[in-house]
Amino acid sequence: MVAPALRTQQERVHACLRSAIERPALLDAVCTMVREQQGVIALDAPMGSGATTLLAQLAVRAEWPLWLTDDDDGGGALAFYAQIAALRRPSLPLVDPAALTDPAAFERLLAEVVDPNRPLVLLVSAPNRDRQPLRSLPLPLPLDLPAGVTLLVHGSLPIEPDARIVLPRADSALFQTQMSLLERRNCPPSWRKPLVLAARGNLLYLSWAERWLHLGLLDVANLPPDLDHLLQQWWQSLSRAEQRLAVLLAAAGEPLPMTVLAEVSAEHPHLILDRWEEQGLVHINLRRLSEDDTILLVRYVHRAVRLFLARHAAHEMNAAHGELARWYAERLKQNPLDLTNRYLGRQLARHAALCPPTQRPAHLPTANPTTWLRERELREGIAGALRDAGWMLYDAAAGSPLNLARIAAITGTLATRARQLTGDVVVAAFLTAVQTGGREGSLRRVTAIVEQLPDGVPKAAVLRQLGEACYSVNMRSAAMRLLSRALDLEAQPVSRAWRDVRDQAIEALATACLTAGDVDRALACAELIDLLERRAQVETLVIRRLLEDGQYDRAWRLSRSILHENRAAWAQAEVAVALERIGDPRGAMMLDELKVETARAWAEIELACEVALRDEEAALRRIMSLPGQHQRDRGLARLARVFAHAEKDGDALAAAERIGNRELRVTTLLELRVLLQGLVANLATERATREIDALQGEDRPILLAALASAHAAIGRKDRALAIANQLRGEELERALSRVAVACVQAGDYAGAQAVLAQMTDDDERDWARDEIARTLASIGDWESAMAQAMAIVAADQRARTSADLAITRARSGDVLTAVSMIRAIEVPAERGRALVLIAPLLATTDATLADQLADELLIGEVRSRYRAALVVALAERGELATAAKIARRIRRRNERVRAELAIIVALDPTDPMTLARLATTLAKAAVGREEIFHALELVIPLLQRIGGTPLLADLATAIIADDRA
C-alpha cells in the first residue's frame, strides 16, 4: 500500500509544481512560523488559495514529510509513516502496521526519533468537512506531539490548534504573486487589474477566469465576484445532459473510468470532457495497469468543483450516487475483473452510504454487510473491507442503534486485522538494523512493531522468519523464544486475548441488564461468553441478585448449572449459606456436596459467625468440624473477632488461644488487645508476649514489631520501645517505624516524633512518615500531615504522599487548597495522578480553572487523561457546552473519544442527531478491536435508554454472530 500511495501523491505534487509560481515571501513567512511555533498549526485557506501547492513546495524545498489525503490511493497513512521513518530512522526501514488507523503508532515513532536540535515538520492536506467525503474513517493524525515536532495541517482538525496561518493574508507579496501568474500566462495587460481585484487572492479563480476569458466564456467588464459565483455561472451555462455528467463526475470517489461515464450517462461524453479539459476543469489521463491493461480516467482538477456541486446541487448528487450504485448492482453478475466493475466494486459502499435511504436502489449487495465485507476481503484484501465497513458505519447513523453498534464492532475488528506485515519485509528491516546498531536493540525495536499485528497464523509466520534471521546472526536464545512464540500462535489461531476483548463487552452488557433488573436477559448474555470463568462471574452476580430478591429455588438451580468448577463451588457456597439462614434443608445438602474445601470452609465460617452470638458452643463445633487445620485456624480467628465486637471477651480469648498456627494466634491475640478492655485485654497481651518469647527464627522479629505496635496503640510507648529494642539493625528500624505510627493512632504525636528521631534508616522512616501523614490527614490536622510529607527523604515517596494528601484534602471539600498543594509537587507523574483523581471535584468547583491547570501543570498523555476526566464529570452534571469546549483541547485520540462518548451518553436519546454523533465518534474509536469494544462498553447506558435491555441482549447476540461469521 505504501508504493501506490507515494506514487499517486507524487503525481499530484508534480501537477501542483508544474502550474505553481514562486511565492518566496509566503514560503519564508511559513518557515519562520513553524520554526518559532511548535505543536499543531492550522493552515486556514479558502478553497483555491493555493494551500495544497504551498504544502507541495514546502515538502520539496525543505524535504519535509507530506501527506495529501485526497490523493493517497488509500494507503496514505502508511506512506506518511514511511516518509518519517526514512527521514529520521533510516536504520530501521519498517512501517508499523497499526499506522493505517491508529495515531498512537505515529506518536510512538515521533517519541523515538524526536531531536530538539533538529526540528521536524510534518505537512498534511486533510479533507474538508463536506457532505461528499472521500474517506470513510477519520485520519490517524498524530496530535499529541513531543517537543521538536510541528504538524502543519490544511483542512479539518478535531482539536484546537496551537497557532494558525491564514491565507492569502500571510502572503505579503500577494499582489505581485497574482500579477506574476497572469504575466506568465500571457494575459493581456488590460485584463490583469480587473482579474486581480475580482480574485481577491484566490489563485484558482485567477487561473480559471483568465483561461475562460481567452475562451470567450467571460466578459472582463462583468467578472463574477468570487469563486463560488464563477462556478455558478459555469453550472448555469450547462445543458441538462452536461449537468448530469458534471454531477456524476463530482459524485465519484476516485478518478472515474471514461466507460463508466459513458454507460451510466447514456451519452458520448468525450467532446464535453475535452471542452472541460480545455477550460481547466478536468484532467484526463491514460493509466497503465499492466502490460496489457490500460484505462482512461477522468477527474476534476480541483476539489472546489465537487464541493460546489455538493452545496448547490445536493439533490442531483444524491441521485448520482443512486445511479452509480444501481448500475453496479445490475452488472454484478458480469465479469468482476472488468476494469469498470472493479472501480464500482471499490466505490459501491460509498455511493450507497451517500445516497439517502429514500433514493437508494433496492437489493444492493451492501444490504447484507457481513456477506459484502467477506466478498470485499476476497477481492481487495482486508484494507478494502475496512474501507467499506467505514462507509457502512457512516451510513448506520441513519439506521437503528443495533445496526450502528454492530457495524462499529465489525469496523474495529477489521482495523486490527488490516495490520499486516510480511516476514520478508520484517527480516530485511531487522538485518539492516543489525548492520547499523546493536543486535539486541534492533530486535527489541523490530519485535515491538511486529507485536502490533493481531495474534494468529500470519503473525506466527512472521515470528518464525524473524527467529530464523536471529539464528543466522548468532542470536540463538532469541531465535528459540521467537520460534516458541510462533508455535504457540499456530496452536491457538484465535488467541484468548482476541476472545477476551469481546467477552468483556458481553459481560458489560450482561451486567447492565442485571442492574436494570432483567435477570433473564443477563443470563442470555452470559451464555454467549466463551471464557467459562468470566461467564461464571456473571452468573454469580445473577445468583446474588436472586438471593436478594428471595428467589432461592432459581438461585439453587443456577448455581448447580455453572460450568466453571471453582466458581460453581463458590456460588453454591453462597447459596448454601442463604438456604441455611432460612432453614432450607438443601443448604446442608449443598455444603456436604461441596468439593472445593476453601469454599466449604468459607460457608461454614460464615454460618458459625452468625450462630456465635446466640450459641457459642454450636459456633465452635462448626469451626472445629472443618477438615483442615489452616481452615480451622482461620475460622477461629474470625470467630474471636466476632466475640470481641459482641463484648464477649472471655469467648474471644478462648477462641484465639485454640488457634494452632503460632503466628496467626499471636496476631489475633494482639488484635484482641486493641479490641478488648480491662483484664482480658491484658491477658491477651501477656499470652502474646509469652508466645513471642518462645519463638526463634525469622517469624520472631515480625511478631515482636507487631507486639510493640500493639503496646504503642494503647498508649504504652515506653513498653513498646523496650520490646522493639530487643531487635537490631533493619529489624529494629522496622519495629520503630510501626511504633511511631501506632503512637499517632493513639493520639501521641509528640511521642511519634521522638521515635522518628531515634531512627537511622531513611526508607523505614519515610514509610512511617507516609503512614503518619495519612493518619493526621484523616483527623484534619493538615499542617502536621504536610510537615511529615515534606520531611520524607525520597523524592518519589515525598511526591506520592503529597499527592495523596492533596487528594484527601480535595475530597474533604477544600478543593482550592488541594490545588495549591498539587502545584508544589515536583514529580510530574504524581502531580498528574492527583489532578486526574480530583478532576470531578475541580469541574464542580471551577471548570475554567480546572481547564487552565491542564496547560499549567501537565504534559503529554496525562494532560489528555485529565481533560477527559473533566469532560466526563461535566457531562454527568449536564454542562455539555463547557464539556465540548474542553474536549476539543484533548490531543490523545483514546482520551478524546472517551470524552466525546461521555457527552453523547448525556444527550437526549430521542434526538435523531444523537445517533449521528454517536456514529461519528464510534468511527474515531474504530482504530482497533480492543478500542471499539471498549467504546461500546462506554455507551451501554445510552443504548439502554434508547432500547432497554432487549437492545442490549440483541447487541450481544449480534456481536457473537458477526464475530464468528
Image (tube, rainbow, N blue to C red):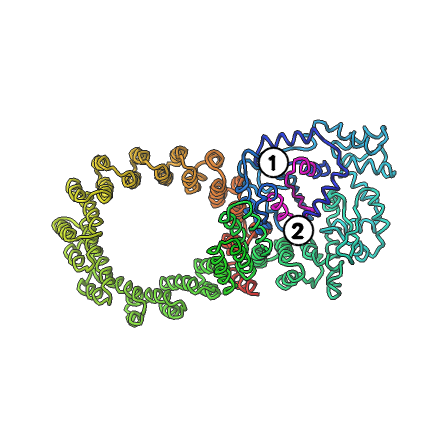
Q: Nearer the viewer, residue 626 or 429?
A: 429
Q: Residues within 10 Å of mark 2 (few under 14, many from 20)?
A: some
Measuring from the top left, give residue 707's x and y in whole percent.
19, 47
Q: Quadrant of residue 519?
A: bottom left
Query: Residue at 54% of width from left, 44% of height from top?
Result: 107
Q: Quadrant of residue 721?
A: top left
**Label at residue 421:** none
Q: Nearer the viewer, residue 857 or 947?
A: 857
Measuring from the top left, give residue 565's x and y in whole percent.
38, 68
In the rendered image, the vertical position of residue 865 relative to residue 963, given as above or below? above
Query: What residue span does the magenta drawing correspond to?
Result: 56-85
Residue 646 covered by magenta stretch: no
Counting the numbered discs, the total is 2
In the rendered image, the vertical position of residue 375 relative to residue 284, given as above or below? below
Q: Is residue 184 left or right of residue 898?
A: right
Q: Is residue 803 visible?
A: yes
**Label at residue 41:** 1
Tags 1 and 2 in contact by the CB under 8 Å rule?
Answer: no
Q: Nearer the viewer, residue 288 or 708?
A: 288
Looking at the image, tell me whether mark 1 or mark 2 is earlier in sequence order.
1
* Residue corresponding to mark 2: 74
